[in-house]
Amino acid sequence: MADRRLQVFHTVARTMSFTKAAEVLHMTQPAVTFQVRQLEEHFNTRLFDRTHNRISLTEAGQCVFDYAERILEIYSEMDSAVMKLTGEITGVLIIGASTTIAEYMLPSLLGDYKKQYPDVNIHLKVSNTDGIVAMVENNVIDLGVVEAPVANKNLAVELCRRDSLVAIVPPGHPLAGLKQTTVQKIMEYPYICREEGSGTREVILDYIRDAGLDTNDLNIIMELGSPEAIKGAVEAGIGITIMSRATLAKELQLGSLVAVPLDPPMERPFSFVHQKQKFRHRAMEELLEFARQYCRTHPGIS
């Protein structure tokens, strides 16, 4: 309902990028530029300085941004208040999730949510944990779900559930017949690792440090950006890895991979992360409560 020009300008100012704003708003970049120019014509002044492919707010732009924050917040509060009175829950939610969660947890959760709230449109962005936290910090997404601890104390972080990680090896590997193994044993073999910024990678490196070992001794022969790619590489006998047991249902059933528990056990949090002060409209409140209930009734996803 709010002035579209103001919404577009606000998104560009938050992301400091016409390209990123276009992605968030599901618009073309020329359409975003047009909306901002219309607002500049309305105020008869530039709202952005554009130099060397970078943008910054002018003094007038900062003024408009400050008022836009308040105006859009009030619009959101009004929408939520009316929805509460009428019982209608609609709107658009932008959710971000790190790779493992997006591939193995959210499809079921969001599918159940859509059955209950069919008029809520959900857009999902997938990145590694660092990327999702950055999107929350920059207000690009309403809610993030991540698979590693969040360091930013200015964000609200709420535990969803705990996830178990295990060693993954191909059948016939020397570790495959063990009831459990240690990280010291794993470090004797070629290792396939997630990319920099991955929550899974950070949790594993912390586990190695906690064991009093040097992470530089991990024999990383390959870095890949998704659990599916890593599983394929392990199946091909290229190396071994540590990953969430939740990702392995199909492979364990087929016998193409073997999961070996770790000693001591390795766990990590799956957590919701969002802005502390940002007003959350009714659809977001319902999604958070739905997700909390889902995590209580689905304590594991293996």
Image: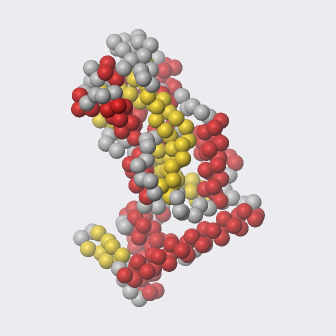
Q: Nearer the viewer, residue 25 or 200?
A: 200
Question: Residue 17 location, x and y as percent?
Answer: 36, 66
Q: Is residue 215 left or right of residue 204?
A: left
Left/right of residue 217 with respect to residue 205 in the rendered view: left
Q: Is residue 301 above or below residue 37?
A: above
Question: Can you say whether 283 is above or below 151 in the image?
Answer: below
Residue occupying the far right of the picture: 86
Q: Position of residue 52 (x, y in %)?
A: 24, 70
Q: Height in image: 77 above or below 185?
A: below
The answer to whether residue 164 is visible is yes
Note whether 244 is above or below 272 in the view shown.
Answer: above
User: Does residue 171 appear in this view?
Assistant: no
- At 36% across and 12% down in the image, what residue appears? 172
Residue 194 horizontal side relative to residue 26, left or right: left
Location of residue 236 in the rendering, given as x and y in whole percent from the top left corner: 33, 22
Rendered residue at 57%/70% (across/down): 73
Name the residue rendered at 37%, 81% in the picture. 59
